[in-house]
Image (spheres, rainbow, N blue to C red):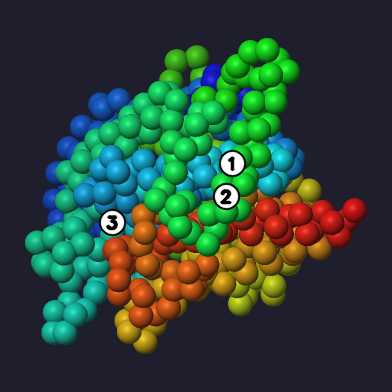
């Protein structure tokens, strides 16, 4: 998915770390498998299967994230809250890719910066849950923890954690990855043909004119450059695309943690850019222990209860050598809390002086329930959190280097508001998520456009 990058020097020793040293630490959010031997067998089988990504791609991404830390790139990370096995289907995969390509086009054009495109896919199969058990009426069963662990159906059988699901998740991730790589290598992302990524909304959306105008501007610029050069401009037909998921189910992550020839240390080869969720970010916990030892770029979700000391301790453990591109903090405070909770964290990290990349997840602090029983997010809160994040970083003198969003290329109605002003009643029409509500394609594009507007407004104030 990307060109080879030069090897980065190996950081200071990882001490007594091993791919399974997390087992000695308190582990949150892991299922209890009824058959421990079946789990061991699945981990062993998975350990023999080929990896999903390569070390070159991982190091190339790390370098791009280091550039994002310096303000030379912007990160767009997005996809489903959770993939499901049944969603491993060509239309859904290509539509998700299309919406991410369209958003990145808006961002590249508007921000005048290269965009690092990172999907929340090809492995986003495990979910943290707020309660271990779910009760419906008289019946209480273990919670659904994502297709990597158990099934969503509310039956005792479906909810039993099954280690063979890890093997299926690996296959589905490989199929997803293979299709995305083939599309991109085949020219799907070619800037000469942005119509390849048109989703049906482009024909009738309130946002269509603005988007089409931008595509026409870019087409004009490409033709101008090609006329000037007397030849086709190369490199417009290929892009880098990276994958990420929450590194939650540690036996799965461990099985895909490998050493590779001519590189020191260990890499998680199930994804380019694993992250630690908010509920598993304890400094002395199993997830932090596992991720400290892999050389991938990694991220940690930072919620409203995190204190400055905790962030500094995470930096000590996860990036002891202050390596560029290594560590991202994804803040997810919610539109109502970001103004109060974020500044002290930014100030502490700024004072400390070590490098991190700041990314805003504008979804997970904004979840609410409607009176008709849907879990939703209001578009205005999502956009409001991103816009506030830009302002807060500017005021503190830090840099917002990217956004993290839950989105889909489908015409779902899961988040309210947006250009089409979806209401609670509209949620009944096309609510498909089994977990968190996602922005639909139109709402996603609208966020990209509002990021550009916000950035321009900030630049105008500085100028
Ligand atoms: C998620 O990204 O789906 C998630 C559960 O996020 P967080 O850990 O920030 O709650
Ligand atoms: Co989610």
Q: Residue at x 64, y 59 (%)?
A: 450
Rounded to the nearest whole Å, what is the CA distance between mark 2 and mark 3?
A: 35 Å
- Farthest left residue? 157
**Quadrant of residue 321 in the image?**
top right
What residue does disc 2 label?
Answer: 211
Residue 199 appears in the picture as rendered: yes
Comparing marks 2 and 3, which lies closer to the viewer? Answer: 2
Tag 2 and tag 1, C-beta contact below 8 Å: yes
Q: Earlier in the sequence, mark 3 or mark 1?
A: 3
In the picture of the structure, the residue carrying the numbered disc 3 is 146
Foreground mark, 3 or 1, reads 1
Give the crowd class for mark 2: few <14, some 14-19, many >=20 residues within 10 Å. Answer: many
**Which quadrant holds residue 306?**
bottom right
Q: Nearer the viewer, residue 32 or 140?
A: 140
Label 3, label 1: how many angstroms apart (C-alpha)? 38 Å
Q: Is residue 244 visible?
A: no
Considering every residue shown, the one lying at the far right of the view is: 463
Q: Residue at x 30, y 66 (%)?
A: 430
- As drawn, the label of residue 255 is none
The answer to which of 14 and 207 lies nearer the viewer is 207
- Left or right, 279 with respect to 106, comes to left
Q: Earlier in the sequence, mark 2 or mark 3?
A: 3
Q: In the rendered image of this protein, does residue 347 appear above or below residue 199?
A: below
Residue sitting at 47 percent across and 38 percent down? 195
- Measuring from the top left, give residue 183's x and y in whole percent: 38, 29
Coordinates of residue 51 in the picture (x, y in percent): 34, 28
Classed neighbour count for the residue bearing mark 1: other residues with Cα under 10 Å, few (<14), some (14–19), many (≥20):
many
Residue occupied by mark 1 = 215
Confirm or reject: label 1 Cβ below 8 Å from ligand 2.
no
């Amino acid at each position: 998915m990307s060109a080879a990058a030069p090897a980065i020097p190996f950081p200071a020793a990882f001490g007594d770390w091993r791919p399974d040293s997390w087992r000695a630490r308190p582990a949150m959010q892991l299922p209890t498998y009824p058959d421990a031997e079946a789990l061991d067998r699945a981990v062993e089988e998975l350990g023999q299967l080929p990896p999903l990504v390569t070390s070159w791609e991982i190091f190339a991404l790390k370098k791009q994230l280091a550039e994002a830390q310096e303000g030379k790139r912007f990160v767009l990370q997005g996809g489903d809250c959770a993939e499901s096995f049944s969603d491993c289907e060509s239309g859904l995969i290509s539509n998700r890719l299309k919406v991410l390509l369209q958003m990145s086009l808006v961002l590249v054009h508007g921000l005048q910066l290269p965009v690092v495109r990172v999907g929340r896919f090809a492995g986003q199969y495990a979910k943290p849950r707020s309660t271990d058990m779910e009760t419906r009426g008289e019946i209480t069963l273990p919670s659904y923890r994502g297709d990597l662990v158990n099934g969503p159906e509310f039956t005792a059988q479906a909810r039993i954690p099954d280690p063979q699901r890890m093997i299926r998740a690996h296959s589905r991730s490989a199929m997803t990855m293979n299709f995305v790589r083939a599309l991109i290598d085949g020219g799907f992302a070619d800037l000469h043909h942005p119509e390849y990524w048109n989703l049906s909304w482009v024909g009738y959306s309130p946002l269509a004119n603005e988007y089409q105008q931008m595509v026409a501007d870019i087409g004009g610029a490409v033709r101008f450059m090609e006329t000037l050069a007397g030849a086709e401009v190369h490199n417009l037909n290929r892009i880098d695309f990276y994958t990420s998921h929450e590194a939650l189910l540690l036996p799965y992550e461990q099985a895909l943690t490998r050493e590779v020839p001519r590189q020191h240390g260990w890499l998680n080869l199930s994804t380019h850019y694993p992250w630690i969720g908010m509920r598993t970010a304890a400094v002395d916990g199993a997830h932090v222990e596992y991720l400290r030892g892999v050389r991938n770029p990694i991220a940690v979700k930072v919620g409203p209860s995190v204190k400055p000391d905790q962030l500094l301790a995470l930096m000590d453990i996860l990036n002891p050598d202050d390596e560029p591109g290594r560590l991202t903090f994804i803040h997810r405070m919610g539109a109502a809390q970001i103004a109060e909770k974020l500044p002290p964290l930014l100030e502490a990290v700024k004072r400390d002086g070590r490098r991190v990349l700041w990314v805003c997840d504008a979804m997970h602090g904004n979840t609410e329930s409607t009176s008709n029983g849907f879990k939703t997010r209001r578009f205005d809160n999502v956009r409001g959190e991103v816009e506030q994040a830009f302002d807060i970083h500017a005021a503190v003198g830090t840099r917002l280097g990217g956004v993290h969003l839950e989105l889909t290329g489908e015409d779902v109605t899961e988040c309210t508001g947006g250009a089409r002003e979806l209401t609670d009643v509209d949620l009944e029409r096309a609510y498909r998520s089994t977990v968190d509500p996602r922005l639909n394609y139109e709402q996603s594009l609208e966020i990209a456009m509002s990021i550009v507007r916000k950035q321009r407004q900030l630049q105008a104030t500085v100028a």
